[in-house]
Image: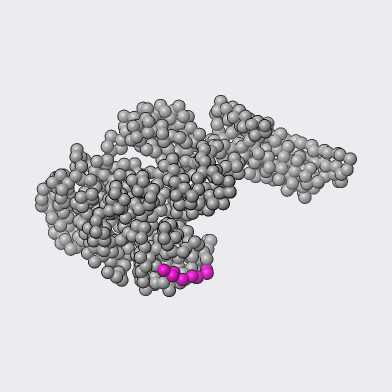
Amino acid sequence: MAISSSSDIRNIVLLGHNGAGKTTLAESMLFKAGSTTRQGSIDDGSSIFDFSDLEQEKQHSIDPALASVEHAGKKINIIDSPGYPDFIGNAISVIPGADVCVLVISATAGIEVNTRRLKLEAENAGKPLAIVINKIDSENIDLGSLMDSLTDTFGNACKPINLSTGGGQGIVDCFKSAEGDTDIGNPASFHESLVENIIESDEGMTEAYLEGEEIAPEKLSAVFGQAMVEKTLTPVVFTNAREGVGVKEFMDIVTSYFPEPASVKCETIRAGEGQDAKEVPCDIDAGKPFIGHAFKITSDPFVGKLAWIKILQGTVTPETEYCLGLDKKSAKIGHLYSVKGNKTDEIPKAVAGDIFAMAKVEEIKSGHILHKDATPMCTQQLPLPTPMYSLAITPKKRGDEKKLSEAMRKLAEEDRTFQPSRDAQTNETIISGMGETHLKMALAKMSKNFNIEVDTRIPKIPYKETITTKANGHYRHKKQTGGAGQFGEVYLRVEPLERDSGFVYESELFGESIPRQFLPAIEKGVVEAMHQGAVAGYPLQDIKVAITDGKHHPVDSKEVAFKTAGKNAFLDAVGKAGPVILEPVVNMEITIPADKMGDIASDLSGRRGQIQGQSMLPGNMASVKAAAPLASVRQYNSQLKSLTGGRGSFTMEFSHYAVVPGNVQQEIIETSRKQHEKQDE
């Protein structure tokens, strides 16, 4: 069917922890809607959503996938996201493409760490929420306790719209009806609390209800989506997706009650540049000028690079012209595609609220705004967690450096939490990601897609150096070799600045003891010394340098002389200023079984970590917040698995640089000395 109105479109993203059954639910939706002739499964390689060789091999989602179904006269765009914590960046990146975020929770595992985090990300993005409790046919589950955990964890907005019956073999509607037998309890009580949450979003309806008036079902249905948007309601749905139980009912709920695109506030779009930029109201209106958000970049094996575009305003055809981001140069859309896993079908047009794909889009990057008006437009992308797990890589084959650079660039375009860099301090090519599994998959993609093999090693810790007190330095450079001489004498003072203040250079000279044309040369010498370090060869930071005095020679003074004098005077001062080594410290949030808290606390203490808070979570789980030096926890994943039997998980983000303890500093200095001696051999 041809979708001509945005009111006939529903956009959902399936979020949740790995193993909850997101992909199985998406596959079942395709099958129930008649989009496929059999239900796809990753087990036998027939999955529409987990279609890549790596996903088939690893048996789990790695990248987001997109497909759509037509149901009850509506189009549902389904975005399936990966659930492993290592791939959380890929999950967060597709949230802007959806109007409702659906948290899929396994009835056996309950509310897991990645589900909690993705729920917060969805809320931060301003998206309405729904919850699907999947695998309701599993043995030894307590759905009543799970509903209590949902309320305790996510709030009183969580209300079931239907309930499991017959041990997960069927579904009972508790929205339209208050009758039937369920696996949880009397549907009448659930119906009443559901109605109360729905009418909370409508003042007039609330007053009528409090006065004893019975609210007609059609009136409740009309404000259901509004209640989701205003966060008074997070509907809970029950499914057994593998067997198809509750899947059609879920699609009925999506098409009948979920808010349409026009009801959900989109991200803020700004037009103009700099401080003059103004917010642009985006109306999901097919008749207004085109505005689209490129929220995801992927690689199609046949079409090439694809950009997924959410139409925020207007109608798109192949002839539609657009400008890109801050660029005022226009181009034509060309070909529009609908996406179904790894397949693309060309379509004649798409309307506001819909999602389409564009090919041959080398200039388009994730987060770009496409717009018909020539005024530059942009948006603020959702913040992603900072990648803290890194590997140093070198190509196994000589001459593959250029291919490696291109491969890293393409992988970074598709996944913003994959970050390649070149460490000038250590001369290493570094790739950073969310964890060991994340980078393993990136390296596997390099091998399969780009035919590049690399050697890996743990990169050097990016230590830095600074000073702790004021000190004066002096150096006199005099060189006479028979020809033209060199002379420059510098007195300077160094003093520490607040952390992350950088470098301040100024002159306190009076008169012409040093001609001002030599001040830039002195600064060059100081900067060179800062890059080389003074304690263990790591860059210096957070230092103010003031030139206080000096001497020059009218003939022999040259820039090179004052550069040398400035560098050595600086090193002289730093040596007296209590130099120390700084190390990166990370914030950690560790989710573990409650009975392992003592083991984790003891282990973190041995790693120089400091526990900053503990809290109990539903399901006999606990959360530990801690700060620890990166050097001691960069391989923490394997240790946590060992301590918790594989049940623990953690997130880690950069916090700040802190002074290394004296005994550890001596170890770093000694290691650095040995490395330099080895390089000099």
Report if residue 159 is visible in the image: no
Verify whether residue 533 appears in magenta: no
Residue at image location 16% in from the left, 61% down from the top: 217
- Residue range (magenta): 328-335
- Direction from residue 508 to residue 591 in the image, left or right: left
Q: In x, y percent, where is residue 639?
A: 41, 32
Picture quadrant where residue 609 is located: top left
Picture quadrant where residue 369 is located: bottom left
Residue at image location 71% in from the left, 45% down from the top: 524
178 or 320: nearer the eye?
320
Residue at image location 59% in from the left, 33% down from the top: 581
In the displayed orientation, state which residue is furthest to the right: 482
Q: In x, y percent, where is residue 201?
A: 26, 57
Q: In x, y percent, where is residue 645?
A: 34, 32
Q: In x, y percent, where is residue 191?
A: 16, 52
- Direction from residue 497 to residue 5 in the image, left or right: left
The quarter in which the C terminus is drawn is top right
- Direction from residue 670 to residue 408 in the image, left or right: left
Q: Is residue 407 above or below residue 390?
A: below
In the displayed orientation, state which residue is furthest to the left: 180
Residue at image location 74% in from the left, 46% down from the top: 521
Tally of numbered tags? 0
The main secondary structure of the magenta stretch is: loop
252 or 219: nearer the eye?
252
Report if residue 109 is visible in the image: yes
